[in-house]
Image (cartoon, rainbow, N blue to C red):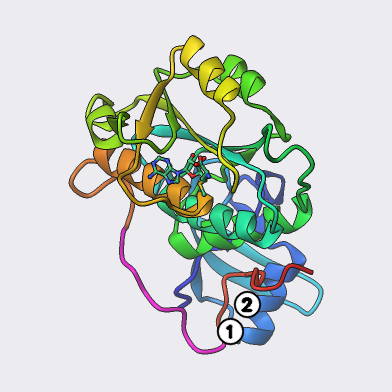
Amino acid sequence: MATTNFYAPPSAIKGSRVVFPEDEGHHLRSVLRAQEGDEVVVVDGEGGWHRVRIDHLASNQVVGTIQESRQNVGEPDVHVTVGMGLLTKRSRFETFVEKAVEVGVARIVPLRTRHAETGTLRRERIRNVMIAALKQCRRSRLPALAEPQPVERALSTTEVDLRVLCHGGDDRRSFFDVVGETEPGARVLLMVGPEGGFSSEEVEQAEAAGSIVASLGSRRLRAETAGLVALSAVTLSGEGPSGTGESTCEKPAEGEHAGGVSVDDDG
Ligand code: SAM
C-alpha cells in the first residue's frame, strides 16, 4: 500500500512482532487510513528490512507481524564518512544531511574548522531529517552522526582505506582520478570545508595524515554541493550495476510523507 517505508528501532521489534512507534502508527492509521491485513515495509536503521502485516490498528497502538526479513537493503557497497565543515546557516547543513543519507553516506562528522569554529547543530532535528530520508530513499541503515570535532581529530579517529580532502585550485589532482582507485567494500573519508574553506594548516594536517587533496573541477561549489558531488562520485564508483537495494524512484502519494521535517527555514 504505502510508497514510503516505515521506521521502527530494534527495541520495537521482538521476534516477529513489531510495535510501531507512536508517530508511525498515527501516520498509518490517520493519514494513510491503513487497514488490518495491509502490508508495509519497516526498516530498523541497523540494516534490518522487514515486510510486515498489520494485525492491530488501535488509536493507542499499531502492531504487526513480520512476514519476511532481509539485511542491508538499499545500502551502498562502499562505506563513506563525510567530514563536513559546520556552516553558518544550519538549514544548509541539514539539507546536506538529508541528501547525503539519500546518496548513501555511512557517517557524517561535523567539522569545527579554523573558519567555522562556533557553528552549532540541532541534533534532534537532524536525527528526524535522517530518519525521514532513510525511509524515503528505502535504505535500511541509519548513518551515524558524530560530535562536531576538529579536522585533526576526524583524521586520526576515522579508520579508512582512503582519505580525500576537497580543496579548490588548478594544480590539484582530479577527484575522479582519486575515486577511480577505490574498490567495492572500501572505507573512505571525504572532507569538505565550510564557506570560508580549509586553512592551509588544515590542508597540511590532512596531507600529513595521508590524505589526497583533490579538486572537484574548476567551479567553486557551495560546501553542501561539494559534499554531495564527492559523495555521489564515490558511492556510484563502488556500486555494482543494480546495487544491493531496490532502486525504484516513486513520488510520495498525495497526503503521504516520509515523517519528514521541513528544512526550508532556519528557525
Ligand atoms: N573560499 C573558499 C576556498 O577558496 O577554499 C571556498 C570554500 S567552498 C565554498 C567550501 C568547500 O567546498 C571547500 O572548502 C571545499 O572543500 C569544497 N569545494 C568547493 N568547490 C570545490 C572545488 N572546485 N574543488 C574542490 N573542493 C571544492
Residue 239, position in %: x, y?
26, 41
State the residue at coordinates (74%, 58%): 125
Give the number of the disc on residue 156. Answer: none
Residue 148, position in %: x, y?
72, 35
Residue 205, position in %: x, y?
56, 16
Range covered by the magenta-colored residues: 247-255
Badge 2 density bin: few <14, some 14–19, many ≥20, Cα 10 Å: many
Secondary element type, mark 1? loop
Q: Measured along the vertical axis of the image, is residue 187 above or below residue 119? A: above
Camera-side residue of 101 and 203: 203
Label 1–label 2 contact, CB within 8 A: yes
* Residue 215 is covered by the magenta coloring: no
Secondary element type, mark 2? helix
Question: Looking at the rendering, which quadrant does residue 11 occupy?
Answer: top right
Ligand 1 within 8 Å, label 2 CB = no
Give the number of the disc on residue 28. Answer: 2
Marks 1/2: CA–CA distance: 5 Å
At label 1, the amino acid type is: Leu
Badge 1 density bin: few <14, some 14–19, many ≥20, Cα 10 Å: some
Camera-side residue of 258 and 147: 147
At label 2, the amino acid type is: Leu
For mark 1, what is the residue? 32
